[in-house]
Image: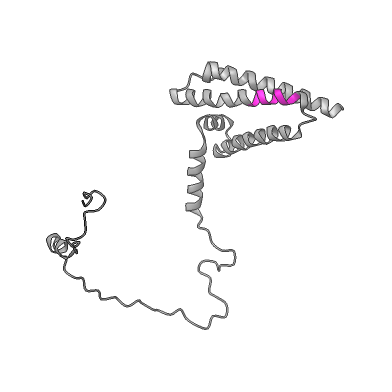
């Protein structure tokens, strides 16, 4: 029973903190972060938008707290959401090169573009290759045959002269006169 009580208290306190912090940021924007100046319009908008998720998470934790021991699925869902948020913070920290202040700026601004750019730079530097592939410049062991020097034959394609539009239209078959013009044609009497 002691562990269940501790879980309920932890969820309650966490829910209160998340709800209060989220509401504060929804109302004050970037000014809710101590020591930070007011941000630009886009940053303010995103920060206030994401703060709504803090409020929602906090309310969900507060709702789950009294019945935490009877609803393990809700507790697992809250823990999973918190874990994913932690992964996002870790990704921002990694993209910032371990600089905490830069990580917070990247996280607040959506570090995905920075991380994507870094990933692209890493793939340009080291081309992927098979582990079993020989090293560059290494001679194959026991090679008997030399690589064949085969060049493809050039295909000779004769292009027909282009027809003029009037000639092409003349070749299109026309329907016989006995066939009506379709659904829009007047009905026979």
Q: Say which quarter of the image contains residue 88.
A: top right
Q: Main secondary structure of the magenta part?
A: helix
Q: Is residue 151 above or below residue 136?
A: below
Question: Residue 13: x percent and y percent?
Answer: 72, 21
Q: Is residue 85 visible?
A: yes
Residue 9 lies within the magenta run: no
Q: Say which quarter of the image contains residue 33.
A: top right
The residue located at (78%, 27%) in the rendering is 7
Locate the N terminus and report the quarter of the image it occupies: top right
Q: Is residue 165 rendered to the left or right of residue 42?
A: left
The residue located at (77%, 26%) in the rendering is 67
Q: Is residue 43 rendered to the left or right of residue 94?
A: left
Q: Is residue 34 visible?
A: no
Residue 62 lies within the magenta run: yes
Q: Is residue 38 above or below residue 153?
A: above
The residue located at (12%, 60%) in the rendering is 166
Question: Residue 59: x percent and y percent?
Answer: 66, 23
Q: Is residue 170 rendered to the left or right of residue 26?
A: left
Q: Is residue 182 above or below residue 129?
A: above
Work out whether residue 64 or residue 136 is closer to the camera in this orientation and state it.
64
**Residues shaded magenta:** 57-65
Residue found at the very far right of the displayed protein: 1
């Amino acid at each position: 029973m002691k562990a269940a009580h501790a879980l309920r208290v932890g969820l309650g306190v966490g829910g209160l903190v998340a709800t209060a912090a989220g509401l504060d940021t929804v109302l004050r924007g970037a000014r809710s972060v101590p020591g930070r100046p007011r941000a630009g319009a886009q940053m303010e908008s995103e920060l206030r938008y994401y703060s709504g998720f803090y409020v929602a998470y906090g309310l969900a934790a507060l709702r789950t707290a009294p019945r935490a021991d009877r609803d393990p699925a809700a507790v697992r869902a809250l823990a999973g959401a918190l874990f994913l948020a932690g992964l996002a913070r870790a990704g921002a920290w990694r993209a910032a090169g371990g600089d905490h202040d830069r990580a917070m700026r990247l996280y607040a601004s959506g570090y995905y573009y920075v991380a994507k750019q870094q990933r692209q730079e890493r793939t340009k530097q080291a081309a992927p290759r098979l582990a079993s592939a020989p090293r560059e410049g290494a001679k194959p062991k026991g090679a008997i045959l030399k690589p064949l020097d085969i060049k493809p034959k050039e295909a000779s394609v004769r292009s027909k002269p282009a027809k003029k539009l009037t000639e092409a239209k003349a070749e299109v078959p026309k329907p016989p006169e006995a066939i009506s013009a379709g659904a829009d044609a007047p009905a026979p009497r």
